[in-house]
Amino acid sequence: VCGKVMNERNTWMFVDLYDDSGKIQLFCHKQSLDPEKLKQMKLLDKGDYIGVTGTIRRTKAGELSVRVTDYEVLCKTLLPLPDSWEGFTDVEARYRQRYVDMIINSSVRDTLRKRSVTIRAIRKFLDDRDFLEIETPVLQVEAGGADARPFITHHNTLHMDLYLRIATELHLKRLIVGGFERVYEIGRIFRNEGISPRHNPEFTMLEMYCAYGDYNDLMKFTEEMLSETAKSVCGTEDVEYQGEKISFAPPFAKVRMVDAIKKVTGVDVEAIKDFDAMKKVAAELKVPLEKERSRGEIINTIFEEKVESTLIQPTFIIDYPVEISPLTKAHRENPGEVERFELFVFGRELANGYSELTDPIDQRDRLVAQADKKEAGDDEATQVDLDFVCAMEYGMPPTMGIGIGIDRLVMFLTDSASIRDVIAFPTMKPLHKSGEEKEEHIEKE
């Protein structure tokens, strides 16, 4: 067997050897191990990798052990490991030296394993339903598909700025135009925004699009997918998150945005049609406004400030204002609204889905309106992607589409308080400039 030395007892008579599958005890005794080898074993340090040969036995206590007849040092550690997880509790240090955190804290490895199982379960769910996973560009000419501030880079050969993608939506929709009826991508997304327990600038998103469906079909599809994923990862649809029982068993609650606001605040915002009157309502509710330029934007801000945090169990908030949904089909019954939902769990957005806007003329008008917002100083307004509008002019069938934050889903399925807990190497500001830390280690040696 091979593994990492982690603990020793009784002057190296008993050694705990760890690998990715678990732990086994080594029994080292002069009756079976060369005395010189036994003496050299005392020079081993916690963290050293060794390869061992021997016979399997059980101790008097009944523990499965290897009676060592020979061993070989495979790798020598040069830096000392913390004595235990209790000795490595500084949060910043744990995220910066994630490799040490993984060695000391088995729950970190368990979380990352469950992350892998989550992604595998989602892929299986979609693949079993004839969806095709297709990769789309990470470097994009226009940063579209979401309201977010992009990272900008420069292509030296083409002499042009490019953007790291903030969504995969517009290219996946081009695939729908091109004749693929069921497509998805699980990929990295980059948004040049704040860092918090719920936000990391680089994160993983599932986006899925399916022809001939609408947001009603999509909500049922989402319920089934999340239910199956929870069962694959946790063995049950019912999980505990931060002390709350969360059930991913369908059906989820479904509430119109205006009705959710009325339930929490008592204000019927649907009846208020005037922009200035809506501003007054926001002031009365003590909801701060910054760059809202329309009635619909104010309604959304009121919802975010007053309602989101109350949505603990999985809840679809449906029928959003058209002003904040430039890529969504107009509602078939309610003027001024679109056929869009967001799924909230524990007061946090987990998914965003809608009946896709497939009218190129309407789409162009809405993107131009977004460009006006950007001109007015809204850095997060959607950019105008004229090539996407051109693609739509060749015909796009009725389509449903959704984006699900993989990191947040893993948080719920692993009871992780911070998004950084479910990312192997979260974004961190370095303590030293490039090379300084390395030179410091060299000096110490």
Image (tube, rainbow, N blue to C red):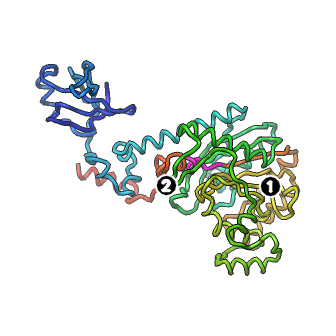
10 Å neighbourhood of mark 2: few (<14), some, or many (≥20)?
few
- The stretch in magenta equals 404-409
Front-lying residue, 433 or 266: 266
Can residue 161 be seen here? yes
Residue for badge 1: 339
Image quarter where the N terminus lies is: top left
Instruction: Tell me the CA gap for discs 2 and 1.
Output: 34 Å
Q: Indicate which disc, 2 or 1, sits on the residue closer to the N terminus.
A: 2
- Rendered image quadrant of residue 11: top left
Of residues 17 and 58, the one drawn nearer to the viewer in this rendering = 58
Q: Residue at x 81, y 62 (%)?
A: 337
Q: Main secondary structure of the magenta part?
A: helix
Q: Is residue 206 left or right of residue 255?
A: left
Q: Is residue 206 above or below residue 76?
A: below
Instruction: Give how far across and how far down residue 277 sits, in percent.
Output: 78, 80
Q: Which residue is mark 2?
A: 243
Residue 61, above or below 319 = above
User: Element at badge 2?
Assistant: loop
Q: Is residue 401 above or below residue 278?
A: above
Q: Secondary structure at mark 1?
A: strand
Direction from residue 197 to residue 24 in the image, left or right = left
Check residue 196 in the rendering and tell me which mark sits there, or answer none.
Answer: none
Q: Is residue 360 above or below residue 51?
A: below
How far across and how far down the image is residue 194, in percent? 55, 63
Residue 159 seen from this side: no
Nearest-to-viewer mark from 2 and 1: 2
* Number of marks in picture: 2
